């Protein structure tokens, strides 16, 4: 039986890894939609290789180029956020959510409403609107809607929970490599350059998540993602620094057992697990030789080095739309760092200032969690963050 598949963010790091897997077994899949951003040449190439129904670029100014590249192929071309959402409403069995940032939320929700299995690499979906996303998946479960984690830590936890009773879970530990500046003297962090922050010791990922790994904003988002996905109290979720990135997460049970998920730092494992779920199938990932590896190291997370972790705890305690505010402020601060407007350390200061400025706006933070209110909180946080960056 062929499965209908769509990939949102197909030209990115996760998108390419997803295509690497499905291209190994082309007869098993019918590709419905592929979406990308500015890399239209690659998007068109993917669409032709996989014989997709439609290719969508996020940017209208790229449409003409995309059309020209797809001329005569019978593949539709479209552009813009509305077209991405429309593509997400086309019937598909399995949808990869691999856009980066809050822009991943609307197509993810649309795919769930149409009854797709949503493989969630885009952690921002749960950070910005967790309760709405879970409720949407639940509402359309009869049509087949379901959420599967793709973030490596969350896939690891999910696998550790197979056949287990959530009531027996005492704690969930997600690991963090520590990123590029794990071993830097803290006082040197303001001098960190974009190139230094964009290079990860273990994982080969998109630039934004790589910088977020160095600042631990990535782990901060993942703490919130863990709370939302597994419905566990924040005080049961821990971060553990593990420089080798071989243990991705551990689940601790009430009898003292810790179940660890061990594997190479290759996202094709988590993507493939979600693709093949509930079965396990052979995947082209490295088999670890633990004797050759010899040792695994661990250390506690340092909240002075990585204030993002403390901020994530505050956001989880606040609940409501605090996650949407946090993520949007982080996106603007990250843009500011990438553009050279603020230094590395200033990113978490900007986010903290946005959180404290908007904390008193109960109507914004504790409004009903629907798409309009998520957008309003997101936009207010972006405006506030830009104001803080410009004022300096
Ligand atoms: P990436 O930057 O490599 O790719 C992002 C994709 O989204 C590209 O196709 C890009 O064209 C598209 N895109 C960017 N902005 C967009 C917008 N505004 N609207 C529509 N499309 C847009 O990113 P990535 O590393 O593949 O990460 C994708 C998501 O997966 C992120 O949420 C990230 O946190 C998560 N994730 C990534 C990894 C990894 O190993 N790369 C691991 C775990 C989770
Ligand atoms: Mg992760």
Image: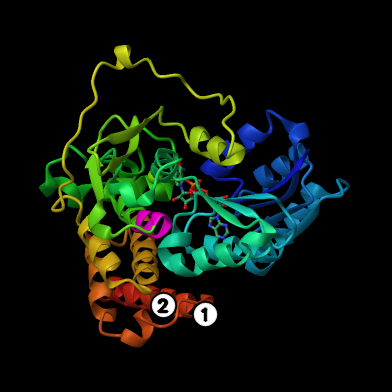
- For the record, the magenta segment spans 224-230
For the N terminus, give its image quadrant.
top right
Residue 79 covered by magenta stretch: no
The x, y position of residue 148, in whole percent, is: 53, 49
**If you read the primary sequence from the N terminus, does the residue marked by circle 2 or circle 1 appear first?**
1
The residue lying at 20 percent from left, 52 percent from top is: 306
In this rendered view, identify the residue nearer to me: 286 or 258: 258
Residue drawn at x 48%, y 76% is 375
Image coordinates of residue 263 in percent, x first then y, are: 40, 28
Percent position (x, y) of residue 365? 35, 79
- Tell me the distance, in whole angstroms, between the alpha carbons under discs 2 and 1: 9 Å
Quick one: 226 or 86, which is closer to the camera?
226
Q: Residue furthest top?
A: 292
Is label 1 within 8 A of ligand 1 (CB to nearest ligand atom)? no
Tag 1's secondary structure?
helix
Q: Is residue 388 above or below residue 1?
A: below
Residue at 25% x, 33% y is 243
Report the coloring of the rendering: rainbow
Neighbor class of circle 2 (other Cα within 10 Å; few <14, some 14-19, many 20+) is many
Labels 2 & 1 near each other (Cβ < 8 A):
no
- Any mark on residue 137, and which? none
Residue 372's label in the rendered image is: 1
Q: Quadrant of residue 232?
A: bottom left
* 188 sits left or right of 375 in the view: left
> How busy is the neighbourhood of tag 1: few (under 14 within 10 Å), some, or many (20 plus)?
few
Quarter of the image containing the C terminus? bottom left
Residue position for label 2: 377
Query: What secondary structure is the stretch in magenta mostly built from?
Result: helix
Q: Nearer the viewer, residue 166 or 154?
A: 166
């Amino acid at each position: 039986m062929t499965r209908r598949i769509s990939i949102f963010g197909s030209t990115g790091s996760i998108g390419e890894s997803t295509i690497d897997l499905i291209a190994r077994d082309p007869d098993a899949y019918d590709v419905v939609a592929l979406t990308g951003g500015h890399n239209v040449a690659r998007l068109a190439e993917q669409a032709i290789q996989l014989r997709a129904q439609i290719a969508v670029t996020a940017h209208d100014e790229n449409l003409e180029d995309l059309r020209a590249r797809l001329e005569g192929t019978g593949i539709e071309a479209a552009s813009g956020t509305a077209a991405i959402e429309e593509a997400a409403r086309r019937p598909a069995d399995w949808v990869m959510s691999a856009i980066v940032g809050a822009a991943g939320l609307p197509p993810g929700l649309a795919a769930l409403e149409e009854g797709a299995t949503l493989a969630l690499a885009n952690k921002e979906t749960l950070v910005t609107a967790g309760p709405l996303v879970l409720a949407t998946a639940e509402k359309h479960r009869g049509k087949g809607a379901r959420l599967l984690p793709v973030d490596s830590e969350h896939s690891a936890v999910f696998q550790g929970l197979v056949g287990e009773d959530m009531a027996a879970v005492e704690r969930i530990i997600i690991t963090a490599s520590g990123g590029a500046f794990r071993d830097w003297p803290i006082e040197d962090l303001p001098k960190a350059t974009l190139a230094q922050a964009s290079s990860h010791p273990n994982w080969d990922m998109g630039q934004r998540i790589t910088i977020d790994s160095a600042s631990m904003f990535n782990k901060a988002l993942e703490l919130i993602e863990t709370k939302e996905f597994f419905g566990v109290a924040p005080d049961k979720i821990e971060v553990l620094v593990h420089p080798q990135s071989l243990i991705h997460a551990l689940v601790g049970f009430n009898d003292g057992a810790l179940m660890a998920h061990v594997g190479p730092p290759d996202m094709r494992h988590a993507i493939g697990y979600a693709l093949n779920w509930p079965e396990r199938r052979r995947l082209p990932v490295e088999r670890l030789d633990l004797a050759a590896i010899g040792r695994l190291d661990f250390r506690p997370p340092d909240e002075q080095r990585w204030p993002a972790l403390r901020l994530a705890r505050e956001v989880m305690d606040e609940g409501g739309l605090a996650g949407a505010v946090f993520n949007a402020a982080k996106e603007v601060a990250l843009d500011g760092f990438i553009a050279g407007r603020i230094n590395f350390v200033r990113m978490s200061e900007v986010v903290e200032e946005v959180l404290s400025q908007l904390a008193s706006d109960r109507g914004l933070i504790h409004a009903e969690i629907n798409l309009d209110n998520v957008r309003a909180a997101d936009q207010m946080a972006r405006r506030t963050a830009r104001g803080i960056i410009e004022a300096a």
